[in-house]
Image (tube, rainbow, N blue to C red):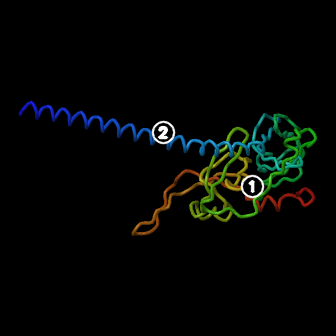
Amino acid sequence: MAQTFASRLRCFKAVATRMRKLTRTAVLSALVVVTTAYAPTLAYAQSSDDSLRIYAVSIVKYTPYRFNGDGIYLGHGLVITAAHVVGHWPSLTRPHVVVADQDLPAKIIKEGSFEAVDLALLSVDETLLPVSLRLRRNPLCKEPPRVGMEVIDVSPKETARARIISPMLIPPQFRAKYPTLITAPQRSGSGLFEAERKCLLGIMSAKVLKYNVRKRALGVFTKPNGYAGYFVPASTIASFIPPNFRF
């Protein structure tokens, strides 16, 4: 009787062990299927984002020392960037635009200022650009940025995703001047594209102190939480570009 019971116990343990192994195999197989299904989606999104880098250019100043900033190619030989990237004395600093692996002298079409409109419009000789770039036109977004909208920051070396945040997250004295914000600062002059339509939403300009806002029973409490990135929106860019250079 004891032998029969021991045999049954061994059999039960063997079955239980077998069931555990089968369960682990099924879970691992499911994870592999899920991961494999999800990976192409991530790869496609990154590939789609990186395709925007064809519009990213470098703004280079050689005098009195070499300085690099970012800009975005619009089409027809026109480049938009932040005014403070070009600087106060472009005739002395002689800005060049590095686009499509070519270092080209740039002409200043219009320049604002960091204190007013932080934009500068430059032009290069379009005939020196490859045909693949000459045929491209980089459209400005028509719709205004919305809080929570997913965006792509584009520079010559990389792209990064972010979201539009509310100006209520920065100090009150800065909200009127810096109303269009994303979660974190990016390189000055880099382009901000709407993730869905891939249109140009703005040009990165500055960083602003950001707060973490929490509501408690005794009121609203704020705590410094890094910096937000301010960008000059597409509507301001459209107004900044002279009528004879619009397309």
Q: Which residue is mark 2?
A: 32
Q: Are marks 2 and 1 in contact (CB under 8 Å)?
A: no
Q: Which residue is nearer to you in this view: 66 or 128?
A: 128
Q: Position of residue 142 (x, y in %)?
A: 76, 63
The residue nearer to you, when weighing 54 against 227, is 54
Instruction: Work out which quarter of the rendered image holds the N terminus and state it.
Output: top left
At 71% across and 56% down in the image, what residue appears? 197
Residue at image point 40% right, 40% down: 26
Residue 132: numbered disc: none
Q: Quadrant of residue 128?
A: top right
Secondary element under disc 1, as helix, strand or loop, is loop
Q: Amino acid at mark 2?
A: Val
Where is residue 144 drawn, in percent x and y?
71, 64
Q: Secondary structure at mark 2?
A: helix
Residue identifier under label 1: 199
Q: Earlier in the sequence, mark 2 or mark 1?
A: 2
Camera-near label (2 vs 1) is 2
Label 2 to label 1: alpha-carbon separation: 36 Å
Categorize mark 1 by other alpha carbons within 10 Å: few (<14), some (14-19), many (20+). some
Kind of residue sitting beneath label 1: Cys
Q: Residue 191: where, in percent of width, then height? A: 73, 49
The single residue placed furthest to the bottom in the displayed view is 218
Q: Quadrant of the C terminus?
A: bottom right
Give x and y (percent) for residue 6: 12, 32
Q: Quadrant of residue 143?
A: bottom right
- Residue nearest the observer in this picture, 204 or 84: 204
